Image: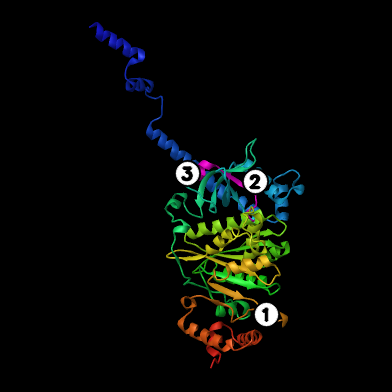
Amino acid sequence: MASKKSRRRRSKRGGGSSQNAAVATVTLQPGEVPSDEQLEAEAAELEKETQGKYDLAKKDDYNLTKLQHMSNDELAKLAKKEKVEDHTSLPKQKLVFEILKARARKQGLMVGEGTLEILPDGFGFLRSPEYSYIASPDDVYISPSQIRRFGLRKGQVIKGLIRPPKEAETYFALLRVEEVNGQDPKKIHDLQRFENLTPLHPNRRIHLELDAEGLETRIIDLVAPLGFGQRALIVAPPRTGKTVILQKITNSIAMNHSPDSEMPAKVIVLLIDERPEEVTDFRRNTPESVEVVASTFDEEAGRHIQVAETVIEKARRMVEFGQHVVILLDSITRLARGYNNAMPNSGKIGTGGVDSAALIKPKKFFGAARNIEDGGSLTIIATALVDTGSKADEVIFEEFKGTGNAELHLTRKLVEKRIWPAIDISASGTRREELLLDPKELELVVRLRKVVSDMSVVEAMELLRSRMAKTKSNAEFLMTMNLG
């Protein structure tokens, strides 16, 4: 009997099983914690409240994206209305930041949107295409936990509720992810990664022909037709009108494949190592739907690389969502130069001072263009500089020659005669063009090529220009031209 009492005494002193001890520590009285039903009701109420704030914030006329697209004069007027101090002395990005803070103080939360860039430490920022994805004060911070929870990846367009920075903070912070590339965040886990998508030859036509006056795009449609997923090079000596042709192609794609068309496409123009005035000209002479991203010649090579990699990652994410994306790059040569200048010396310097390892990433950029089976596509139309007098440019062109599946060659011979567009018809062409052209159209184009093959570059272009000017469309031109 004594032994039984001692065993019970030891148990009361804590010497019993760990299971008994654990049970003792979590003994709760009724009412000390909420019931499951109560918690679920509170969670639903919180979700409803947050959704209400999001819906209210969406109705605000001045969200982050709209402010970033406003002109300096419009921002100055709004800053004065919001009583932002010293607004006349602030740069645009800082002015947007201060206006956002002023408006957020009134309504608590706002809607923010941008393209995700994830830094090595695991956190990220939403960058704006309006600033060519350069870091700015009005960027939105995303925590590592949010990135992990939703499986977010670089290049995705994130939209959600943001709050203003607290006392010791510098940036706006994302509170809740509402959309990823316009879709519910829960759906992105089911997407195939870009690398796992099946590439095919381009078999869906990109129509460039706009009107009777647009001879440049009408000629390209005949001699080097483009399809969704094309990897095209515009081979251009200096002063042969490559920028004008690139603008014409941009406008044609944006008009013919607008968001409300049967085959809508997102058009992104990427200008690397370009003159600032050329960037302004491009932005003013292309539709608003076109995204113009630039890194000018006065910026570091690392900046060229950062811009290019952000754009290509954004395009890859859009293709994963089944969209068609067209990137017009000016130029692949300058991008390769940027990688070469930024790369540490590997000791394998080749002709022209080009490091053999420096061209791997530019090739990966260009090689990303592809037509996806049962899905979207990524089209890249890049200019390649030749006859610049630089040995490095020659080496770069030789590396990229043959990697594309369409080439458009420009020539100085036509420029010297003041004939535009300066397209070398015989040297230009598209691989597997039979997948893009109607059989009858293909037959007539082949016959046209046979006729101009016996002519000089100048004679061929003069013939094409004079005959096409008399017709309203390429179909009419091909049907009425006597090709023998």
Q: Earlier in the sequence, mark 3 or mark 1?
A: 3
Q: Which residue is mark 1?
A: 420
Above or below, 415 against 365 in this view is below
Q: Give the x, y percent position of residue 140.
A: 60, 46
Looking at the image, which residue is at 68% across and 50% down? 93
Q: Give the x, y percent position of residue 405.
A: 52, 71
Left or right, 190 with reference to 83: left
The amino acid at mark 3 is Arg
Label 2, label 3: how far apart the Cα atoms are: 27 Å
Secondary element at image label 1 = loop
Q: Earlier in the sequence, mark 1 or mark 2?
A: 2
The furthest residue to the left? 1
Residue 353 lies in quadrant: bottom right
Q: Which mark is residue 463?
A: none
Looking at the image, which residue is at 73% across and 55% down? 73
Label 1, label 2: how far apart the Cα atoms are: 48 Å
Label 3, label 1: how far apart the Cα atoms are: 55 Å
- Magenta stretch holds residue 413: no
Q: Earlier in the sequence, mark 2 or mark 3?
A: 2
Look at the image and give the residue range highlighted in magenta.
132-147
Secondary element at image label 3 = helix
